[in-house]
Image (cartoon, helix red, strand yellow):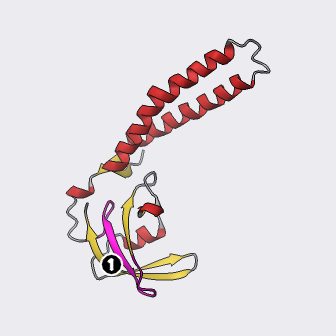
Amino acid sequence: MATIPITTRGAEKLKTELQRLKTVERPAVIQAIAEARAQGDLSENAEYESAKEHQGFVEGRIAEIESKLSAAQVIDPSVLDAGGRVVFGATVDLEDEDSGAAVTYQIVGEDEADLKHGLINVSSPIARALIGKEEGDTAVVQAPGGERRYEVVGVKYI
């Protein structure tokens, strides 16, 4: 099984969700199924069907998270020493060469990616273009709207 890179923050987020699913969601679903069973005929019981469907979702998500955590390679960006190069977990300050707009991204795992918060997936086109670059380098990204060029202004490991 291949390892999945994830930051320490992302791993903690998954562990918290797993804990919530096991200690809150799972018991609630079991209770809902028990209450629906107590109503009698299960063949036409919408509450029972809904509770069983929710149970399938909860159990599937638990299995998915456990699988991801077992295959996870947890990387703490604050202890990285990549010599100023952009690597997984690095926070990169960029400047769009065309518009001059400044943006900051952190390269994270698939489950952590959230563009609104500046977290980009390591397998995204922009992250792939940035990996290995250093301050002062230009990254060329093939975007849907055409080629974009970004100058790497700074690289931090936080």
Please state the horizontal and vertical placement of residue 68, each as a whole percent of the image.
Answer: 43, 43
Is residue 123 visible to the viewer in this orientation of the structure? no
Front-most of residues 47 and 86: 47
**What residue lies at 22% left-to-right and 59% top-to-bottom?**
80
Q: Which amino acid does label 1 sit on?
A: Val
Please state the horizontal and vertical placement of residue 141, each as a whole percent of the image.
Answer: 46, 77
Please state the horizontal and vertical placement of residue 132, each as a whole percent of the image.
Answer: 32, 71
Question: In the current view of this chain or complex, which residue is farthest to the bottom?
Answer: 98
Residue annotated with mark 1: 152
- Quarter of image, res 103: bottom left
Was residue 77 drawn as part of the magenta stretch in this picture? no
Please state the horizontal and vertical placement of residue 127, each as a whole percent of the image.
Answer: 41, 68
- Quarter of image, res 57: top right
Tell me if residue 16 comes above or below residue 110 in the rendering. above
Front-most of residues 24 and 150: 24
Front-most of residues 95 and 123: 95
* Magenta part of the chain: 85-102
Side of 151 where 63 appears, left or right = right
Was residue 101 drawn as part of the magenta stretch in this picture? yes
